[in-house]
Image: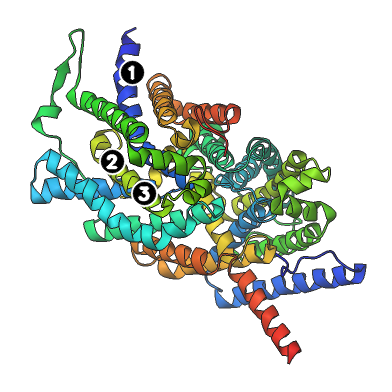
Amino acid sequence: MRTILGILPDALAYGMVLFTISIGLSIMMGLMRVVNLAHGAFTMIGGYLASFALVSLGVSYPIAILIAVIGAVIISVPFEFLLYRRIYRRSDELTQILLTIGITFFIVGIANYIFGPTSKPIPLPEMLKGPFDLGFRMIPAHRLFVIGCGVVTAVALWLLIEKTEFGVRLRAAVDNGDMAEALGIRTQIVYSVTFALAVGLAAFGGVVGAELLPVEPFYALRYMVTFLVVVSVGGAGSVTGAMAASLLLGLADTTGKYLAPEFGEFFFYVAVIVIVYVFPHGLFGKAH
Amino acid sequence: MATLSVTAAPSAWAGLRNDLIAAAVIAVLGAIGYFVYPDDLAFLIRVIGLAFLVISLDLVTGYCGVATLGHAALFGVGAYAAGNFCLAGVTDPILMLLIGALAGTATGLVSGLLVTRFRGLPQLVLSIAFGQLVAALANKLSSITGGSDGLAGISPSPVFGIFNFDMFGRTGYVFSVIVLLVTMVTLLRFARSPFALLCRAIKDDTLRTRMIGVSVYPRLVVMYCVAGAVAGLGGALTAINTGVVGLDSVSFERSAEALIMLILGGAGNLWGALIGAILFELFHHYVSTASPFHWMILVGVLLIVVVLFFPKGLVNEVTRRIGDFRQARAAR
């Protein structure tokens, strides 16, 4: 029981970080059918910007998050305009994989050229540093903050997708892009906005989750696979699926590391193989 | 796809002539390498080892259209198997190659059964997960793999009991070139076989192939086994030549690099795979003297340029240009 209580907050926090970062990728893959392996690179840009803002500019934590999100979105615009537009929907996975791996290498190289090849600290504000008393046990305040961020992101996205005009257009474009276009939805604009949203969420998740997934020079490559796996297990384009997959994989990974640390990522990938083999379109995904 | 050089052989003689040309080309390439880098044969041996991996990847990606990012597993298992048997006393290099190929085939079978079941994203993720699983095992089963220290002290006996592996890598280099030559000629024949042509048909239009009565899944699995044998051969060759097997031989980076080399050279063409491996490694050799991050920027740009401007790869692009030029001249 004690072990379970020890694992749960960590697993939950880790799952929420995975969710916050991966949900952007999930929506993008559901909508544009782009296997965007460079998603982690945009997360890394967010982390680097936040670290720079906090350490060198000395701004407060919320401002740093804002700088990271807006900065990452601005940096991503030329990539979207020049490269991603060519691979939306109508190209094979191989092309997408290679183009986005190329973008990842490019971003990792440039980021390290500018900021130097050391890992980047993202110091927490005083409020989040200490432990927090839940009544029956203490857990780090930061873990709670991360879990809260994940929940807020999920609810906000649900509202955006289910309750707004943009959400209607987005869902129409996901379900049938050609038909949506024929009905007068300007899919290119929907795509661009979604891309910006995905990058913004990636950067946000990168900053908030830096305690669990530390921002370091090869961040984009190290977690490239993890984010893709979350989306694949959940089913591309599904918020519920991404949430379920994140929590499940967060639990599998954290439990594996607690109970059998000598096997590292073994259980994580066994879980992935089993789930993907049984549910090839993800837990909550639809066949395209 | 119509411009590819691989077509069904019209006669036995034409096939034989193609094989002889292929053998000559590889022998000449090998000789050129020997005279350009006489003091750096270890580098060339590394290139040849990787070329096997890329050629193997071409069999599943270029011929069957399977997108995989876990192909290094087949290579690494071959290397570890050959290394272990060598440490256990099976030191004959030819036997080690066979063991590597067998281990690669077995890994290819498991990998193929998993990966070729689906198309698209699930396929990609299963291939990654399988590769990472093998990598995690290689890291953990240190009694077999040496863990992160790697497997060391592999010292094969002389080839045919005559040619010793010297420290300059001369024997190793000639041995590698000959193995590559034999494999390449065999595979070029294999690529003209009805089986390989059927795999191409599956790649071009899976649904149509299924409709004419072909059962797709078993064929893809068989192709995966062949690819496993080739990759395992390359792994064993690397183990024989370097005497060590490290975790990098099963890493995700190795798989991704192999894919990059393949696309650079040209998928669906065995020569493309070979040339891609050579070009990428040469590029690496000359550029990586700068910091690893400059190297990454350049590889990134190179990849983006190739994908945007030479989507069929350099070799296929050059063949197409030559074909266009000939047609234009014939028309005049």
The image quadrant where one finds the N terminus of chain B is bottom right
Q: Do labels 1 and 3 share a chain?
A: yes
Position of residue A250 measured from the top left corner of the image (x, y, whole percent): 39, 26
Are the residues flagged by discs 2 and 3 in contact, CB closer than 8 Å?
Answer: no
Q: Picture coordinates of residue A35 (x, y %)? A: 48, 47
Is there any visible trace of residue A208 in the rendered image? yes
Residue B195 position in % (x across, y down): 81, 51
Circle 2 sits on which residue? A206
Considering only order in the chain, which callout, 3 or 1, is on the residue closer to the N terminus? 1
Q: Nearer the viewer, residue A247 or A282?
A: A282
Residue neighbourhood size for the residue with mark 1, other residues' Cα within 10 Å, grouped as few (<14), some (14–19), many (≥20): some
Q: Name the residue under label 1.
A: A7
Figure disc tally = 3
Q: Which of the two discs, 2 and 3, sits closer to the camera?
A: 3
Disc 3 designates what residue? A195
Answer with mark 2 or mark 3, whichever residue precedes in sequence. 3
- Label 1 – label 3 distance at C-alpha: 34 Å
Secondary structure of residue under mark 1:
helix
Which amino acid, by three-letter code, is at mark 1?
A: Ile
- Determine which of the numbered discs, if any, sits on residue B151 in the image: none
Q: Nearest to the eye among marks 1 and 3: give it.
A: 3
Q: Residue furthest front?
A: A183
Q: In this view, does A119 lie to the left or right of B253?
A: left
Q: Residues within 10 Å of mark 2 (few under 14, many from 20)?
A: many
Q: Do the residues labelled 1 and 3 touch (CB within 8 Å)?
A: no
Of A188 and B29, the residue lying toward us:
A188
Q: Earlier in the sequence, mark 1 or mark 2?
A: 1
